[in-house]
Image (cartoon, coloured by chain):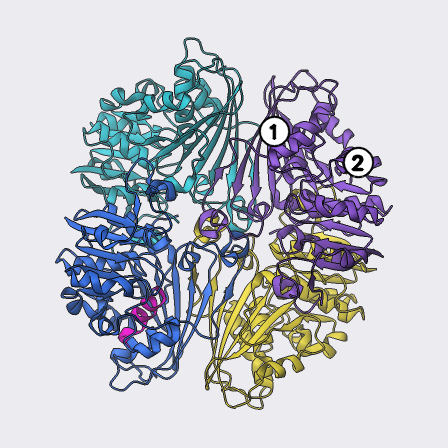
Chain colours: A cyan, B blue, C yellow, D purple
């Protein structure tokens, strides 16, 4: 059994991690922490655990975390970087579900996240935890930067096209839509039920932190860095799910893009490619670690990729566990092989 | 491995059965049938199965079902009674998730369901599959009448009070609210998104088929049949979940009703009793087989019980599998021990 | 034109008041105030006013309010009572949409609202603004206590039965369900979209402030004070609407309760009585000032009344304007005669 | 008073027309028709009309419609073209809210709508009823082709850019999202609450009828027909509202696009232009005839326009009434000047 700790277990990502790890056959949840809820029981904050678990939230001290082998950070940005160095020094492994280690260029990170990075040296070491791209490196990593939710949906949708250089990398567009759990469990007027339901809008049109993350990774796929991506996120009145609608202009006449995608993802347990003309739905991946994609050539010049994930699973907690499974040599889908709920 | 068949696998209850049985470690789904969808693949009708299963819908013939040991009927009322006799004769076991075998008084059944019963003799044999009430009989049953969703939530909420005769059985009130999946996957205007969302209403005020089912069972708990229950169902703009708010007038001064409930359900894996003053939420049991209850004495005379279940799980497919587990001597929670999704 | 001021215009009730008064043909909105948003424009906080209005939020000072004839308080409880005396002294009229003047018994008020009342003498003078009960007194009032949303739906549903003493007043039950806008626009985790949607629960089972308000008014209808009401509110995952399901035990064999209700409300523009067996829906009254009721004798002893309103209109802002129309001798439905949106 | 008839009054568009026309101060609804609901009262099918209206649905015969001056068709595609010629011959005016007269190229129409056009000669005469583009022609029209909902949101969003030729017309992208009422009130599984809520998906990726309509109109703005538009619609789990996210590649360095849009729409009562960087929300226009737009230059090459309407109002019934107001020389906003509901 892997002894794991979860720092920041009271947000939606943390709760989802606990839910999945609780049922994972090779994991023992040794500690859950929360600065604000010390002493409270899990079932008090998450009613679905009533009667099932005696876990209580503790202070995220080194002593508490020393009992664990692997620590997940489901904390706000800027938290993990302050403790990770000590944990790694103590021989622990760390998976950060926030953004602290996602962007290799520290100046870019500091620009978008508005603070000085606490351990730039670890940024270099950290492995970007997208298994479909970096499986080998993940296997041996001490420190995983778990990808953002939007980036996961966009990158899995565009990887095959960029790796083969079939599209113009200077005119990429990602029109993305996310369920509201992506905004967290904080008490903000903007995510009240009466503000979100029966409503739809874009946000972050002036710039979103996931844009540099996506661009940087996509650039690594090309011989020359030249990605120009327009990224427009929207807020969906649903709880879980991301739908990325991706527009690219073709460089090629290649016809069977679906075959290309199926070949690229042939050995991936968590990526399914629908026939062209079919429409992935967020509910098909609700509460699962799957990404479902269709790739469509809608005109001679225009390729449209549709890509869906559950932002809390493949976009966060599930992918973190997938990374853990890889790091520990377990079956990659252990504990994260649920089938989507319908309805 | 138990070889099971699912007759009527295209409604929400059937889909939920398939989802749960697919992941059940002791079950092999041998056949799924649907008269209207013969030849179609499961993943075509239920997008969450894409890439996971090759199951195809077949005709519900005796030949097809002969390959199974246990057959679940997730069909409209009046279907199972036409085939069940032959299946039982052939040595199969049957769990009917519809209403054909729920009401022992055949005349009452025929009144409410508007047709002649096809096999009244089996009604007598059938065991009403509420494990918390009938576990011993279920163990040896060939034919299970799986309880209705509303009845499950109401009966689990009232059982302890009636067994101990602590309330006036002639003035019981069940104000119940159900998510829309309870109305099925048929194409009816009344359950369109634009009709149901941002709306709330009662229905069936003039009489609902679950009332005689509940009354009959509750009467079996009393020395004399005298239950008078007012039952008012309402349609909730959510997909899953039933909330029963139960009003009873006390016959007693007994103070600690919570202790009584906890004692009654001490050995039940799927019933949790909250402290008085707490409020069970439907999301706490979403996609789980749990029933969560609180019992509250709000005045000297008035007891209010709050009881929640997932109508598709403890109210249908999950309870059916719980019954199967009991029939086959398996751990009662095998395959149905999921934790509620939040959000 | 009546010059009106709105104190506390940034909550959902305040916004609804502004929306309705803005379109009222005999009203000029002279001032809107908000301590927290001074200087901000209405359209900044309420996007639907963009391009339509230049109103800005001001400090709620006496100088600002002196320009108005009538001041509406859409403020938290305990606010209006601190300014109302001075406004009345200055010859203004006041309609309080909060609870400060709703309960005649000041000790009861202080118990439930947890503070000392600032002007008990005005409580006596204040008229409870339910036009269907108090129209004559409203006409000449200086100070209106606008009823709570739950009380409006419950009282209109029970008035005819209690006035005629057709039911046992010691065994009344109100099972009520409210849309989430009733909880206000404050930033609380409990009303986040991801907490409320796809969920349903009761709240306040241990006691709710609307219970003493309802009981006190219902008692005024009886020769002797003896109302015993059980009141259980629930949170609906919709934005607008209250549905009250009311249970009473009959004292009578009177058959045609529907006729009785229609006679009682024959001259009421805002109360409609459906045939028995029909189900009022919250959407039928969405964004309207209507209350729709059906009264059903479901057994010899049991009467069930279904009653719906829009909590922000007939339950708050619309009723406040109805009261204003009466006070100023206008047509009672002026400016509040909208038809329900569907969908 | 203008005597109007509404053919096909039982769908969401028809209901919305009736709601708006019922309150219009210069209109008398003379007839509402529905083949399937002849004899039923309006309030039976639309609960919000209970107690307000005695209108009954009639057969859509020439005799019935002869009593009207203006007939609105809120019917399925292919219906109006069969009766419109006779109505025009009889001196009536016609506004078709379906697609029969929207596309000037009859062969294109027949390709997309799959039938032979019944009166191609009237297609030439019909005026495309987008007031912001065709006001003068609408004034004198006998026959109005009311624009589609998606086309309205897309065209208003792109008009200023194309009229000034500031963008590459061969690389336009419209990523559009519509509330479910756009799919009508028919009983289809795909629009059940349990299918639509908590879900999001694209549809029509292989081609949608609104694409040729939009392209044809946009081409009329250019010196040479060269529009290449990629159009991807998505289904939103809300009842009302369209959000169009429009991507165009700039031909120019023009900086202040917002000023350009404001100038273009300076005299339009129903188009508002937000500052760049702001996000129009569908709720801001809920139940109103407004279109709210922001235009954003997100990089040197990329312009993103955000445009929202209520699909049932500016996208259908409200725009039809706006056209009627123009045809009859009334104030253009008469009867359609409501403010958006929040929440």
D138 horizontally vs D196: left or right? right
The residue nearer to you, when weighing B224 against A219, is B224
Q: Nearer the viewer, residue A153 or C312?
A: A153
Residue A83 in view in this figure = yes
* Label located before the other in sequence (1 or 2): 2
Q: Position of residue B48 (x, y in %)?
A: 35, 41
The answer to whether residue D111 is magenta is no
Residue C109 in percent (x, y) is at 55, 73
Judge from the rendering whether residue D33 lies leftward or rightward of residue B276; answer left or right.
right
Q: Chain of mark 1?
A: D
On the image, the x and y values in percent for residue A138 come to 26, 23
Q: Chain of mark 2?
A: D
Which quadrant holds residue A78? top left
Q: Is residue A145 above or below residue C147?
A: above
The residue lying at 16 percent from left, 63 percent from top is B89
- Residue C56 at least partly seen: no
The reply to whether label 1 and label 2 mark residues of one chain is yes
Query: What mark, if any, has residue D125 been given in the picture?
Result: 2
User: Mark 1 sits on what residue?
Assistant: D246
Magenta stretch, main secondary structure, is helix
Checking the image for residue D93, the label placed there is none
Residue in the image at 28% along x and 66% along y: B81
- Asked whether, in this view, residue D330 is left or right of residue C247, the answer is right
Q: Please state the extent of the stretch shown in magenta in the rendering.
A: B149-161
């Amino acid at each position: 059994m892997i002894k794991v700790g979860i720092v920041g277990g009271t947000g939606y990502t943390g709760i989802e991690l606990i839910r999945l790890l609780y049922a994972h056959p090779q994991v023992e949840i040794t500690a859950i922490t929360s600065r604000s809820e010390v002493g409270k029981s899990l079932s008090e904050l998450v009613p679905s655990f009533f009667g099932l678990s005696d876990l209580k939230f503790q202070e995220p001290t080194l002593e508490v975390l020393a009992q664990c082998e692997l620590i997940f950070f489901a904390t706000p940005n800027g938290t993990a970087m302050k403790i990770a160095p000590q944990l790694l020094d103590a021989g622990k492994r760390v998976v950060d579900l926030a953004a602290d280690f996602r962007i290799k260029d520290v100046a870019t990170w500091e620009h978008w996240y508005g603070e000085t990075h606490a351990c730039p040296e670890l940024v270099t070491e950290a492995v970007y935890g997208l298994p479909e791209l970096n499986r080998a490196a993940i296997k041996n990593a001490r420190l995983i930067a778990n990808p953002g939710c939007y980036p996961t949906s966009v990158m899995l949708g565009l990887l095959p096209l960029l790796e083969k250089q079939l599209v113009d990398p200077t005119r990429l567009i990602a029109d993305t839509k996310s369920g509201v759990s992506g905004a967290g469990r904080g008490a903000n007027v903007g995510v009240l039920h009466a503000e979100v339901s029966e409503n739809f809008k874009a946000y972050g049109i002036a710039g979103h932190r996931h844009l540099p993350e996506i661009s940087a990774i996509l650039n690594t796929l090309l011989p020359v860095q030249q990605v120009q991506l327009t990224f427009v996120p929207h807020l969906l009145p649903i709880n879980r799910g991301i739908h990325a609608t991706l527009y690219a202009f073709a460089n090629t006449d290649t016809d069977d893009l679906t075959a290309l995608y199926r070949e690229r993802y042939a050995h991936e347990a968590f990526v399914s490619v629908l026939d062209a003309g079919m429409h992935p739905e967020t509910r098909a991946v609700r509460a699962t670690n799957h990404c479902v994609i269709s790739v469509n050539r809608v005109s001679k010049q225009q390729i449209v990729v549709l890509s869906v994930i559950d932002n809390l699973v493949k976009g966060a907690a599930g992918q973190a566990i997938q990374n853990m499974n890889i790091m520990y040599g377990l079956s990659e889908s252990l504990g994260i092989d649920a089938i989507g709920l319908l309805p």
